[in-house]
Image: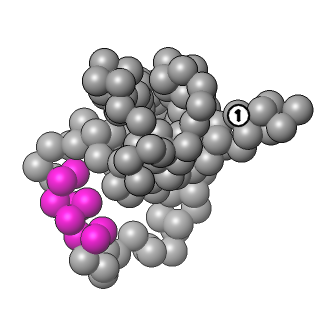
Amino acid sequence: MNEVLEVILMGLLAAVKFLFAAGGLLIRSSRPWYLDMIIVAVGGCVGVIVFTYLGAFISRYFARFHLFRIKFRTLRKVARIMDSYGLIGIAIISPMTISIPVGCILSASFEHDKNRIMRLHIFSVLIWSVLLFGLKGIFNINLGEKL
């Protein structure tokens, strides 16, 4: 039961803060690397789906009040990435830096095609999952022992 609860909580954490879930599983998990990769990838994909639809609703709501004026330095960087690289840039950086909900809400405010948003963000989550946990599996790295 304890193992099931940990898997569910890590999946939910991956839906909201992908980096924290991946880091926690990379450091202290005793499961094989591919199971951890699946947990984080599925949690991230569920987060993308939920926050894409929720983000479209939130961006429509806030658009009425003109609250999307970018005042903070981090959001200015995100806006520059959006201007330079578009939706693909937001999808690539969102799982690791700005979190999945923020990335999906920003994407929904700039793009109205939800299927395109979900495809790009899910692809990004899968690439980051394979990259992080694949390196752990290939090089047999155990960060829990090293830290």
Q: Which residue is mark 1?
A: 7
Position of residue 135 in the picture relative to residue 48 (left or right): left
**Picture quadrant of residue 120:** top left
* Residue at the spot 23% in from the left edge and 61% down from the top edge: 79
Which corner quadrant of the image does residue 135 belong to? top left
**Residue found at the far left of this picture:** 84
Q: Residue at x 73, y 40 (%)?
A: 6
Estimate the x, y position of residue 99 in percent, counting from the top left.
Answer: 44, 53
Give the image location of residue 1, x and y in percent.
Answer: 88, 32
Is 30 contained in the magenta span? no
Q: Secondary structure at mark 1?
A: helix
- Residue 92 occupies quadrant: top left
Q: Is residue 17 visible?
A: yes
Residue furthest right in the image: 1
Magenta-highlighted residues: 74-82
- Residue 66 vs residue 18, the one in the foreground: 18
